[in-house]
Image: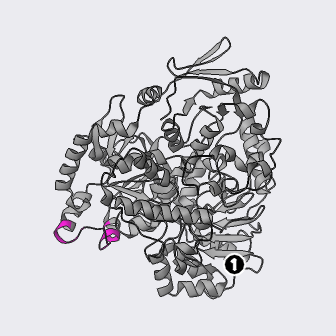
Amino acid sequence: MTQQTLYDKLWERHVVDTLPGGESLLYIDRHLIHEVSSPQAFAALREKHRPVWRPGANMAVPDHAVPTRNRELGVPGIRDALARQQVRRLEDNCRDQRIPLIDLTDQRQGIVHVVGPEQGLTLPGVTLVCGDSHTSTHGALATLAMGIGTSEVAHVLATQTLRARKLKTLRVRFDGELDEGVTAKDLVLAMIGRLGTAGATGFAIEYAGDVVRRLSIEARMTLCNMSIEAGARAGLVAYDAVTEDYVRGRPGAPRDEQWTRAVDHWRHLVSDPEARFDREEVFDATILEPQVTWGTSPEMVVPVSGRVPDPAAALDEQDRANLARALDYMGLEPGQALEGLPIDRVFIGSCTNARIEDLRQVATLVRGRRLSPRLKQAIIVPGSGLVRLQAEREGLADIFECAGFEWRAAGCSMCLGMNDDRLAPGERCAATSNRNFEGRQGKGGRTHLMSPPMAAAAALTGVITDVRGL
Amino acid sequence: MQAFTRHSGVVIPLNRRNVDTDAIVPKQYLKKIDKQGFGAHLFDDERYLDPGDVDTPVQERRPNPDFVLNQVPWNQGSILLAQANFGCGSSREHAVWALQDFGIRVVIAPSFGEIFHNNCFNNGVLPVCLSQQDVDELFQLCREHPEQPLTVDLVGSRLQWGEREWPFEVDSARREALIAGLDDIGITLERAEKIQQYEARRRREEPWLF
């Protein structure tokens, strides 16, 4: 039999039909919805009097523009009138179309990419889409998951399918062993640094190798999450015992006899030993240091011991202009060391790094210590209400608050600054999120992406610090 | 969807790579629940010197005179020329609505962010991939003759600038849909029976998903 990659298997399983012109009609098992990319899609359906194809295949949750304070007030507590209207519209649309909604007051509310796996909506072997580029996160469960635009959201709502062309496959193998203080975030940042922000455009990335097999599902989600920052719409990790343990018992997971059947089915969700990938990249994780971005694209990243590049050494004129613009925006000098760079704010959160393990790593470092008085603010925004609850039960929230962190309610928050958590012009932030674009966290704000332990180290010292020497 | 066959217009040069959708339309405008009026906020962070939000009247903003969209003749341009990986990052379709509302019908670049690329087609905005060499040549021509319009002919799959011509390739399915201004959802629903048959099979084989 032909040797197939995991991506090939997932793709083949979901092709409903091949269309004239060569596109495929791909069946979508799960569709996640949030308030920002959906109102215009629902409006498009209404305009044509089209029903939602299978309401139960959808799940909605507000996350992008929701406040992370005063949540006991529910929707009326959203002070921003536009954000409030948008969340209300989501509620109305879901009620009208009988789509399951986790509302703002529900303990399960949180970032859509944290909630999906947590609730067992994300299952191995399914196709899952959402109007958000970080949907690649869900690939950690051997799920074919992709971000889509609002027109495609409407298409999925109305037809339960997506028109798509098959992607090429890239296997990224991480060999060796991670040093203490080095995490999945550092693996993926190093990968983006090597591939470039468009290096994997047109590919689905499968993460493999010893290091990945030893990672938890949460860490695998961090890896898959940032696939899009290398241009790849989908990231994947093969099914194994770790996946099985994670899924078992989740609210949406199959039970009893169906569980046995499902596991039997899921066992095949691996790339065959001789499967051919269109491209392969291999990394030695053993020599990897914690990574920090210095610029305005995730590809502008160096090891923490590294220095900011010098545009004079650029390969061409465009590259030089690109680097010079980023340095100017970030307020940095060519050749400057990153270690010791003073920061103003710390943001620990986002669909990349706001799960319980991320918070445990931070707590281990800040327990019994005080954050640097130099900081204006340090906030921790858990990925979901359940993560928040768990952290409180484990005593992590107390540790954070004693150290001087603000402990917030769940949402996307300062990752994209749609709510009131944002940077002022010129402020420098140590962030565990996924994008350091100009203005991403607020107009003129300067973002340095790093892992949760690295952000914790920066919070303690007030400067960019190698967590391994803390 | 708005059909696209042929378009002529002034080319707006934006000589930068990795222009992300956050730059095309910043987050504070994503709270709107319709598709109208995003053009005023196209490249908002660079286009205005002062910060703004949905409630700030555009007339009261201070335009950045150094930004291309605030300069003649490009403030009237309808074709955007940029460098590699245009539209990377966030999936926000608002970026395309902003381009479209400003009056831009074509974006030319050596490569595009994938989701943005799809979003363009779904709104009747044509993304044209050209080689780096061709893009660089176009930048050169724009500098020399900023007022001269470029003609984009989707039916003939070529760009025309005076005597100069460049062929380009577009995915054949996308091309046809754009020329006819087809309604994607309507076409897919013609296959409703196939979708139902597929669902019935999956329901038997993987009942836990239904």
State the residue at coordinates (32%, 61%): A123
Measured along the vertical axis of the image, is residue A320 above or below residue A417? above
Q: Label 1 amino acid?
A: Leu
Range shown magenta: A244-258
Q: Looking at the picture, how far across and down is residue A3, in whole percent?
A: 28, 43
Q: Mark 1 lies on which chain?
A: A
| Residue A209 within the magenta-colored segment of the rendering | no
Mark 1 — residue?
A460
The answer, for residue A215, to whether it is visible in the render is: no
Say whether residue A367 is left or right of residue A248: right
Query: Which residue corresponds to the image point at 49% horizontal and 58% vertical from the top-left?
Result: A225
Q: Is residue A201 left or right of residue A345?
A: left
Location of residue B26 with respect to A369 vertically, above or below: above
Element on which disc 1 rests: helix
Q: Nearer the viewer, residue A343 or A250?
A: A250
Crowd tier of the residue under label 1, counting other residues whose Cα lies within 10 Å: few below 14, some 14–19, many 20 or above: many
Percent position of residue A234, x then y: 44, 50
Q: Which residue lies at the image location 76% right of the left edge and 25% below the top edge?
A: B146
Which image quadrant: the C terminus of chain B?
Answer: bottom left
In this orientation, which residue lies closer to the viewer: A307 or B117? B117
Q: How many numbered marks are there?
A: 1
Q: In which quarter of the image is residue A77?
A: bottom right
**Nearer to us in this view, B126 or A39:** A39
- Residue A453 in view: yes
Q: Which residue lies furthest to the top in this view?
A: B163
Q: Does the magenta stretch include residue A253?
A: yes
Image colouring: one colour
Q: Nearer the viewer, residue A310 or A287?
A: A310
Q: What is the x, y in percent for residue B190?
A: 28, 36
Find residue B198 and report its horizontal and vertical position in percent. Answer: 22, 46
